[in-house]
Amino acid sequence: MLQPPRSRWKRAAFRVIERAVHHLHGDGPISQAELGGIRNFVVLQYESPLGSVIHATPLYEALKCAMPKAHIAVAASRMAAGVLEHSPFVDRCVVTPNPFENFARCVRAVRALLQTMPPGPRCVVTTIGNQRTRLAFLSVFAGSAVRVGYTLAPELYDLPLAFDPEHGQIEGNLDIARSLGRCVPFYGPRVFFAQKDAETAAQWLASLTAHPDAPRIVFVTQNSGGQRNQWVTARFQQVISDLSRRLGAAPIFVGTAKDSVPIDALRNDLPDAGISLAGKTTVATLAALLAQCDLIVSLDTGTFHVARAVGLPGVVIAPAWQSPLEWLPVDDPRYRVLRGPTIQEIPPTYCIEEVSVEDVCSAAQTLLGKFPADPAQRAACMERSTGRSVNQ
């Protein structure tokens, strides 16, 4: 994620603001020892892609495991709060006004959050995807705190970081904890849900017409519309028909409300239409549903990242124009990332033609051979992602 070039006057202005802030708060450059003593963290989480929010969740676990007494608060959008509301690694998640719509009100909300932190030095953190200049100013105007993370205004930060896409978003976010002097291992993304969410998902799954022992396979056939990563509908229909015939599995479709019409059109020509939950799930009920399934076959979308966060094995059909190292689990045996040779420019009519029906069917059956449908495995996924206890 390369940063755009910035003019000299902008850099100079940022430096002036940085000196004024330090003068106002009576502080100066922070030492590594002082960084290591921070236990209060406010994370700004306003990025809109679901995947970005999920890829930041390992940071909360890393901070909490490295510093069990740390107090971690998140100033968030409503969508981000839906991801984090049940996390045992987040002490408070506060939905604030949108900083891109009402900056002043958002500043007041984040300032109030900082003021209610426990005694001791405080740190404002921006994860990958939240490196917007406006969020840097938000961290400055919210009050006295050490500013750490990814930003387009490094002059305003005590510890600015630069992101390398080939390093991966998860490792990049974990580097925030490492920059504070903490030696943290790799943590995967995690999304938690409540028991009521699990019960809702179980009721949906009870309507499946498949044999009780058949694998539960979730299909994500629609993308968000923001990127060119579509796969031909007819190919999805062939894959779903083949897996239903071979394995006796009824398909389960998920997506947004606007996805429901194309999903229903796709289902019309299937031997078993399965069930569609498009537009019916929250992040928590989606996570609960995925935790009770056996495999996901998905485009590279936020839903796939939720599946990974609850431990559901999957096949992801990925575009050739984006490096899989930034977003996808390329070295995890529970996942198969299918993509063609890398291309540098995206054709205007790009579609993922380079991934075949046979590729997807073979990868799905291979994964189900390694990780077969198993109620005990579903129960383990459920236990790992349910409740508020860190020890779960």
Image (cartoon, rainbow, N blue to C red):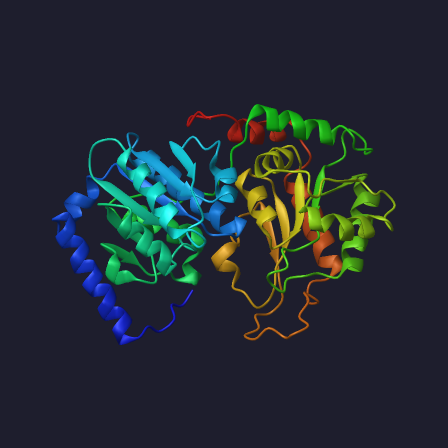
Residue 172 in the image: above or below residue 187: below
Count of numbered labels shown in the rendering = 0
- 322 relative position to 13: left or right: right
> Observer-nearest residue: 264 or 318?
264
Quarter of the rendering occupied by the N terminus? bottom left
- 82 relative position to 173: left or right: right
Residue 178 spot, x, y in % from top left = 29, 48
Residue positioned 75% across, 28% down in the render? 206
- 195 relative position to 137: left or right: right
> Observer-nearest residue: 361 or 293?
293
Residue 373 spot, x, y in % from top left = 69, 34
| Whether residue 90 can be seen here | no
Residue positioned 75% across, 61% down in the render? 232
Residue 112 in the image: above or below residue 263: above
Residue positioned 79% across, 41% down in the render? 247
Residue 74: quadrant of the picture: top left
- 176 relative position to 223: left or right: left
Residue 122 spot, x, y in % from top left = 24, 41
Residue 252 spot, x, y in % from top left = 74, 41
> Observer-nearest residue: 7 or 172?
7
| Whether residue 49 can be seen here | yes
Residue positioned 62% across, 66% down in the render? 340
Residue 251 in the image: above or below residue 390: below
Residue 69: quadrant of the picture: top left
